Amino acid sequence: MKRLLALLLALVMVFALAACGGSGKEETKPTEAPAAAEGEKEESEEAEEPEKAEEEEKAEEPEASGETIKIGYVSDLTGATALWGTAGQYGAEEAIKEVNAAGGVLGGRMLELVPMDGKGEPADSVTAFKNLVEQHDIVASIGTNFSSCNIPMAAVADELKVPILGTAASNELVTVDENGNLHPYSFRMCFIDSYLGTVVGNYAADTLKVKKAALFTVAGNTNSESVGQFIKDAFTSKGGEIVSEEQCQEGDVEFRAQLANIKNADPDIVFVIMNDYAKIATFAKQAREMGIECVMMGHDGWDSQQLAGEAEGALEGCLYVSRIGFSTPEAREFGEKIRDNYNTSMEAECLFGRDGVYWLVDAIERAGSADPTAIRDALEETDVFEGLIGTLVMDPATHNPSMACAIYKCEGDAFNFQEIVEAQ
Amino acid sequence: MFLQQFVTGISVGGIYALLATGYSLIYSLLDFSNWAHGEFAMVGAYVAIVFSTMLNVPFVPAALAGIIGGAAISFLCERFAYRRIRKNGSPNMFLMIAAMGLSTVFQQAANLIFSGQYRSYPFKLPISTVHVANAYIGVLDLLSLVITAVILIGLVYMINKTQFGLNVRAIACNAPAAKVLGVKVDKSIASVFLLAGGLAGVAGILYGMKYNVFPTMGNVGLKAFISSVIGGLGSVPGAIVGALLLGVLETLVSGYISSSLRDFFSFALLIVLLLVKPSGLFGVEVQDKA
């Protein structure tokens, strides 16, 4: 009995050690993928630990000529939102594997991703980024997916003269300060809030021809509140009325108190501006349970291959607006690679991580150098970058990419592409 | 409208109650707040996920495995962490610090093993509601309320009417005296951890069925802790009442005032209660409580 208990204790300690060591800065190389599971609805779910930092290192990569080029990655790798942070990391790692397998950049130099946990917190993200620049000599950094983190990081990037590529950081202030001055070293890959919010609000008013709307946002979440405000502005300017405005807090799973108010207001549409598919699905199910029958509409926070299935029919006929990229065959193929190699389903962040790497590769090749300032110049001069999230056209004056929006509609177990829309 | 909010509040409070009773039981014996308790629920929920989705075990046995998993992790923590600290004669503060450490370790371990992804059980109840008067009650809510009620009634009976309950109450009252009188203190404490862990496992699975399973789901333990303080730390019926009260209060504040002020009101209630009636609604008079 004693021996058994000692063995169990040892196991617990191994877990503890793994937990302490796993989230750190060591480069995380995936081991061989756990055998891929069925392509059915649920992703493969072996109990395999995605233990990385393993011995295989760079043994089988093509011979490198010249120094390895290090690319940083700052995101929320632990905590409540680690789902996206790690998704972006997997996407970036997969892309780097592809690039290295194809011979690297600048005639044979290998790339290396150095991930660092910013915990989704501004202070931690700034520290992580500084650490990457000062201790790891990165030439550029990908991430984060939070505007609240990228806004303070932008000023630091200007100071350290190392470019950062925000992934889903959509607030206007990520690339320009309050006075409208450009942060020369800060870039992003996503829509800005005003653009997306306007598209959603206009589409509801013009195409769906609804008059009364309820707006549901996440209090304290910059993206949700800001997009919500732009939806409201666009929708009301077209003659629509917001009959109910409700909020939840980050991490909430119980929405029925607010839903009771929404039901009372009897809207024609509910704008659900949340960034988490499981919460959106829960929201939808609770809404249907409470007898709210109207259509719901969302923004790019709805981008998840699991949303429709998770909602179990509660989102049937509902719509969201996002990039074109998420549903293309290329994106799906990449999603399968992620599923096979990392035992996780694809989130939009995977594509952002992947595109971040390829955009940097494109810039490094055009610059002919891995010098951070040269990379920055090349990023700014990007004419058109074809990524999996869509075709990105860079505005050098604001560092905001412009991309067309697509409308997706929930039909059965999936959201299907409907049409392309523009603001106005 | 009010009825709807009330019903929702009760269903939220039901989950808090399952966890809060665990807090209370452990507090009554060891005089410390087991901060890792929410994580026991998380572990239980994940064990059920492993069984139901990875090993394709039918849901009911998988859920039982989850409950056993919650109980086992709770037992192991007591056996290898808390008991040692107790035997060292360290102050109770050390137990709480150890619990905080364990809580973080479990959360990180879950993140590492299962990734931050949301998992759901293959067992789904159709989205359907029972319409009573002016309120809609979800079938899953109804089911989980019934399960919770049955378990909690059983628990209160066990504490008040069985030899085991008597032992636990004796230890809670005066552990050295109970030991002198022949109560097996260590064994009883271990049993209480098993029981509390099992209850946490049930809570974890019900929570997972309603809201999915994810590594930070154990954070709901904080609410359960507040419930148990409101009810009176160490009192099982108090914890249940405190939990229902907190669930209803939160829902009413979210519905009628603002969801942003929800936690403000919860903690304000806690502070007011600590000022006016420090032992909580049902608590016994004690000074040195967390």
Image (cartoon, coloured by chain):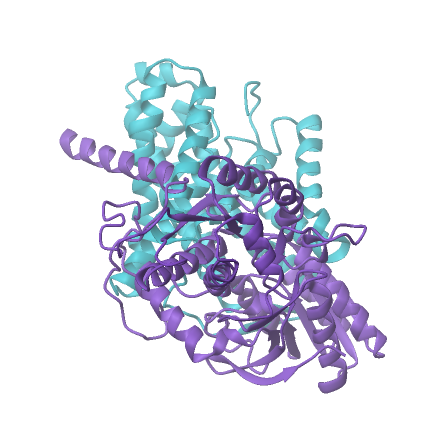
Q: Nearer the viewer, residue B222 or B130?
A: B222
Residue A393 screen position, x and y as percent: 62, 70
Residue at the location (26% across, 47% down)? A57
Residue A120 in sight from this viewpoint: yes
Residue A260 screen position, x and y as percent: 69, 66
Chain B drawn colour = cyan
The answer to whether B25 appears left or right of A130 in the picture is left
Residue B67 screen position, x and y as percent: 33, 50
Using the image, determine if residue A80 lies above or below residue B288: below
Q: Nearer the viewer, residue B222 or A212?
A: A212
Q: Nearer the viewer, residue A411 or A291?
A: A411
Q: Quadrant of residue B193?
A: top left
Q: Quadrant of the N terminus of chain A?
A: top left
Residue A251 in sight from this viewpoint: no
Residue at the location (49% across, 46% down)? A79
Residue A67 screen position, x and y as percent: 37, 46
Q: Quadrant of residue B101?
A: top left
Chain A drawn colour = purple
The answer to whether A183 appears left or right of A233 in the picture is left
